[in-house]
Image (tube, helix red, strand yellow):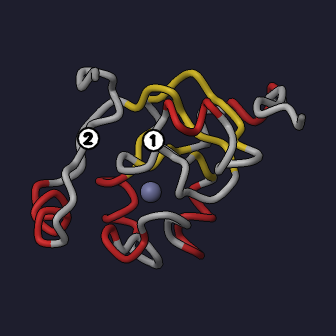
Amino acid sequence: MEPAIAAIPAQARSKQLRACLLCSIIQLPVDFRKNGCPNCEDVVQMKHNPDRISSCTTTYFDGVISVIDPDKSWVARWQRTSKYVRGMYAVRVKGRIPEDVEAELENRGLKYRPRDQTDQD
Ligand SMILES: [Zn+2]
């Protein structure tokens, strides 16, 4: 069985990285700028939108995990990321998405779950 969690190189934990408030994926700001969020871009629309990037992502996160096989990983299930792309994700992300993004989610019948672990099952 393929290990679900890979060691994160020290430099990857640099403060340069930002975590998406919605799906908790961690990327460099330049990646959010160029490609938006690989999971929730249709809702957050961060691509080429620095204001959106600063309101929908944060440098305040911890517990970095690497999701290699999102369909099988128990970590992914626990993180509710099973439909997401493989990549680095934060265990905890501090902050909330802006209200208009939350409203947009509701329009789509989705319930926003903050990633700061105040929303325990
Ligand atoms: Zn996202």
Residue at 19% x, 71% y: name it.
108
Q: Can you give x and y, in whole percent of width and height, for residue 60 in the image?
A: 43, 30
Quadrant into which the N terminus falls: top right
Above or below 88: residue 1 = above
Residue at 28% x, 21% y: name it.
120
The answer to which image quadrant residue 46 occupies is bottom left
Q: Nearer the viewer, mark 1 or mark 2?
A: 1
Q: Can you give x and y, in whole percent of width and height, for residue 81 in the image?
A: 51, 46
Respond yes or no on whether mark 2 lies under 8 Å from ligand 1. Answer: no
Mark 2: amino acid: Arg
Mark 1: amino acid: Arg
Residue 80 — which label?
Answer: 1
Quadrant into which the C terminus falls: top left
In terms of sequence position, does the residue under pointer 1 or pointer 2 come before the other? Answer: 1
Above or below 58: residue 53 = below
Could you tell me if the residues under marks 1 and 2 are in contact, i.e. CB atoms within 8 Å?
A: yes
Closest to the observer, 40 or 10: 40
Q: Can you give x and y, in whole percent of width and height, for residue 57 in the image?
A: 40, 49
Q: Is residue 119 left or right of residue 72?
A: left
Write down the residue under mark 2. 113
Q: In this view, does 39 lie to the left or right of 22?
A: right
Respond yes or no on whether mark 1 lies under 8 Å from ligand 1. Answer: no
Q: Is mark 1 on a helix, strand or loop?
A: loop
Q: In this view, does 102 lie to the left or right of 84?
A: left
Categorize mark 1 by other alpha carbons within 10 Å: few (<14), some (14-19), many (20+): few
Q: Is residue 50 left or right of residue 14?
A: left
